[in-house]
Image (tube, helix red, strand yellow):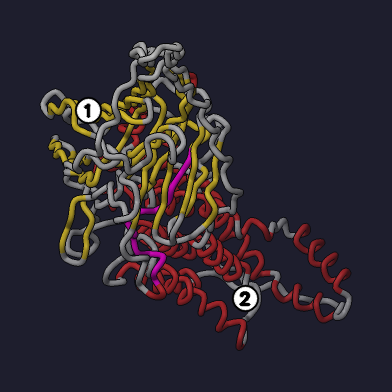
Amino acid sequence: MNQQGRFLLFIAISLLIIILWSAFFAPPPPKAKPPPPKIATRSTPAPKRPAPSPAPAPAPVAPAPRAAPEAAPPVTTQVVDTRNWTATFTSRGAGIERFVLKGKKDRRHIGKVAEGVNLAHPAKDQPVPLSTTIGPADQGFGATTRYRVGKFDPKAGILTYERTQNGLTVTKTFTWKDGSYALGLQVAVRSVTGAAATVPVKVEYSAWEAHPKTGGLFAFATRAEIHQAACYLAGSRSMDTRDYGKVEAPKTFTSAPAFAAIDEKYFLAAIAPQGGLASAPGATCTLASPKPNELVASYSRALEVPAGGSGSAQFDLFLGPKATGLLHAWGHGSDVSVYNGSIAKVGKLLIPILRAFHHVANNWGVAIILLTVLVKVITLPLSHRQMKSMDQMKAIAPKLEAIKKKYEGNTQRINEETMKLYKEHNINPIGCAVPMLVQMPIWWALYETLGASYELYNEPFIHGWINDLTVMDPYYVLPILMTVTMFGTQLLTPQATPQQGQMKAMTYGMPIFFGFLMMALPAGLVLYIFTSNVLSILQSLWYRRRYPSPAPAPAPLK
């Protein structure tokens, strides 16, 4: 196998490793601090007097005002309909049961039916998303506590839930604006016993997928609704994640958590402290996966409740598509969910270029083709040098064979003479692989971009054939064309030495293996590689016509 064939094998294996990358194990989270002990009041009875008949006892000392605990109210639902989404809120946990996006692109294809993306899909035994735990779960307000509805005004964009128990009155207030994917959540806690307390407030977002990924060999190419739970630590380069499909111990992050989220590849449900970390003392972010098809991301902070007074914890919520403009507007560093990881950050360069080409062509597939042309033009000098180096290698092939025969068995001497020959003819063997080395980061970045960028999600190339560039070609046309063009590049690549038998089969079998791998990858990526192959073939044909291959040099070695 020549250098190019071995390098293609390396690229294929690298892509497979990226797809199958797994999350890290983590220790269990620290236990929550117990609440301060309650101070109870007692009435003092009057002393007994030695009298023939008992005198009436004086009235007991009145205890501190204390509201009577409410009976658990019935579960009710409240529906809110805006331009961007329709949500079903529930008084069980004071959270959301459904949150369906209404945008033209915000649809998933379930078989032949296109359904609006639902960002709230908990299991039956899970707390609903945006439910809260206030204080220890066994003493305070748990995630399934039932609330009564206070104020509900859909036009004004406000919904309030209230509940009093265990000496605390809790009020949860959701606010929103029509046409926005951002919501506000205020959790107000009032002490009705007169005792000051530090109360932990945790807001969690649970997610559940009814069916694990299916599809046999191509299971990694199918799209489950939930993708991963994530914590973003302010100042870090990427999110800490918990992938869907695994059961691991919960992991808590205490170092500057900016937000907690459920990441659904092209959509995000995130919780962050309003006003940033400065307004969230004792903030933590926890990731949990109690079952293979369940994920939970939660954000916690401490709330100081003064004696006889109240305190409030305010949160920013985002439930919507991962469009870079929307994420920048929401803030909290949430655009890291699109460019998560070092290689993916190259996508920060690709997306503006693709967006500019899309502005011209009004088609994201054509934009990918134009990006390929741009990269090919930039790397044209390197490609030209590569072809020249291969021709030089072919020309000195007889001398290389003579060196191997003359110094057979002496590997060190063969290497020395080979390098001397390269130096005499001004040949850099590494230069043959430089164009491919330049392409690899772009391939990886484009793969990551197609897997997370909302701009490319549900965008067609040719209607009726490729209706979504972020999923595999349903008819395998592009992988087949890519395999054929890869054969073409192999045929036009000069071989330093004639290949025989198994080596030749490996070299020309590589396009088949690579094409088979590409069958399950996003069509946008395969379109990029296919276009690059076509341009390489055209460049090779032009080069052969402009610079005919030189005759092999004789090898007069004695």
Label 1 sits on residue: 160
- Between disc 2 and disc 1, whose residue precedes? 2
485 relative to 60, above or below = below
Q: Secondary structure at mark 1?
A: strand
Quadrant assignment, res 75: top left
Most foreground residue, 48 or 537: 48
318 relative to 29, above or below = above
Left or right: where 312 falls relative to 547: left
State the residue at coordinates (56%, 61%): 387
Q: Dot 1 surroundings within 10 Å: few (below 14), some, or many (20 or more)?
A: many
Most foreground residue, 354 or 497: 354
Q: Amino acid at mark 1?
A: Thr
What is the quadrant of the C terminus in the image? bottom right
State the residue at coordinates (34%, 47%): 127
Left or right: where 61 falls relative to 148: right
Magenta-drawn segment: 218-231
240 relative to 469, above or below = above
554 relative to 329, above or below = below
Q: Secondary structure at mark 2?
A: loop
Left or right: where 35 falls relative to 224: right
Q: Is residue 19 among what the camera can see?
A: yes
What is the quadrant of the N terminus in the image? bottom right
For residue 1, which numbered disc appears in the image? 2
Most foreground residue, 24 or 199: 199
225 within the magenta span: yes
Q: Dot 2 surroundings within 10 Å: few (below 14), some, or many (20 or more)?
A: some
Most foreground residue, 94 or 553: 94
463 within the magenta span: no
